[in-house]
Amino acid sequence: MVMERAWLAVKIGLIITGLFPPIRRAAHACKQSSKKLMSTPWHVLGAGSLGTLWATRLARAGLPVRLIVRDQTRLRSYTAAGGLTLVENGQASTHAVPAETADDPAPIRRLLVACKAYDAENAVARIAPRLAADAELILLQNGLGSQDAVAARVPHARCISASSTEGAFRDGDWRVVFAGHGFTWLGDVANPLAPIWLDDLQAANIPHEWTADILTRLWRKLALNCAINPLTVLHDCRNGGLTEHHCEVATLCGELAELLERCGQPAAADNLQAEVERVILATAANYSSMYQDVANQRRTEISYLLGHACKVAERHRVNLPHLQQLQQRLIARLCSLGLPSD
Ligand code: NAD
Ligand code: KPL
């Protein structure tokens, strides 16, 4: 009896201090499942690198997530794999995120679009009939151009753009390695009000910030990518190899800064060359994303990076001879490798 009371006292003590594992686990599970019941589900369109990185972290935080895969064949493959695997600091964890195809009838209120820029518009068009009246889309695409194309397809939905410096790559089917910790800026060019689901990102430990100036962020990243990525392909080098092409980089930065000033993005032009040089040094050992796409015989996002810059320059009648020549050289290289040049 005394022993029982003593154990009870210890148990109560442990409960109060939150250290009694079964009860703590039960309370945690209860909190997680009520979170799941109360929250709007996150639909993730595109189970690639970034889609998996987001889906697994949201699921790990106990939030409801659903994956939208291309077709029934991919759905069967996913079911056989038993979930999405995230490799972080060498540790793999598998998350059985429920999956479906675009043909599922359930309405969608919150959609994370995690396809490549060239796939985003068509992918969204396929699920457009499922979007609820108050649907919100988060567009993770790099570069510019795809966001407007998506928004035009779903004029009644709220489209939020993201610019991310996080890094992830696939090392197998349904498996992603979290390679570089970074940050994601989110914003809506049409509405400065922050959405309530930023709390979900906080809970999922996804470093982020809401910004009224998302266009400046997207243009700045586009300019960085234009100054670095094509040259790494053309010179067949890591980012650090561009220190040997200092003049070429400086000339491109000058033209990109002129473009940014002329198209109403002066803040994105600020100290561009200095930042490009800093990024080249900080990522010297890395291959740029465009270099990796080319090396793996994958289509690049050229039309949404250099292609977009050249198109806007033409629209504003700005003459940028080196940038145009860079685009022609890159297209010629892609064609010679049998890769799409758009
Ligand atoms: P990814 O190729 O790894 O993934 C894209 C996924 O979308 C693929 O699995 C593809 O099958 C799927 N998809 C395409 N069309 C679809 C459709 N109709 N229905 C369902 N799924 C479809 O690409 P990623 O590396 O995750 O890049 C996504 C975007 O994020 C790109 O614009 C990229 O530039 C940007 N980004 C990526 C990283 C990164 O580290 N991977 C970092 C920052 C920004
Ligand atoms: O974002 C990049 C990429 O490789 O796409 C960096 C590292 C900034 C080079 O442009």
Image (cartoon, grey):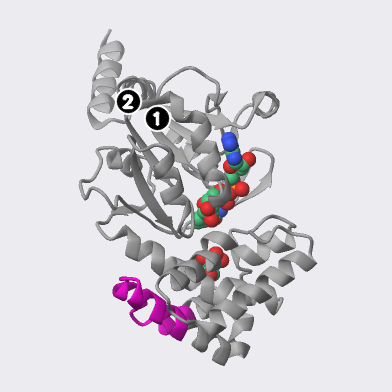
Kind of residue sitting beneath label 2:
Lys
Residue position marked by numbered label 1 in the rendering: 62
Residue count near mark 2 (Cα–Cα under 10 Å), binned few <14, some 14–19, many ≥20: some
Residue at the spot x=29%, y=21% of the render?
A: 11
Image quarter hosting the C terminus: bottom right
Residue for badge 2: 35
Cβ of mark 1 under 8 Å from ligand 1: the answer is no
Amino acid bearing label 1: Gly
- Asked if 307 appears above or below 20 in the picture, the reply is below
Disc 2 + disc 1, Cβ < 8 Å: yes
What range is drawn magenta here?
254-277
Asked if the beta carbon under badge 2 is closer than 8 A to the nearest atom of ligand 1, the reply is no
The quarter holding residue 213 reads bottom left
Q: For marks 2 and 1, give the CA distance.
A: 7 Å
Observer-nearest residue: 4 or 187? Answer: 187
Q: Nearer the viewer, residue 316 or 10?
A: 316
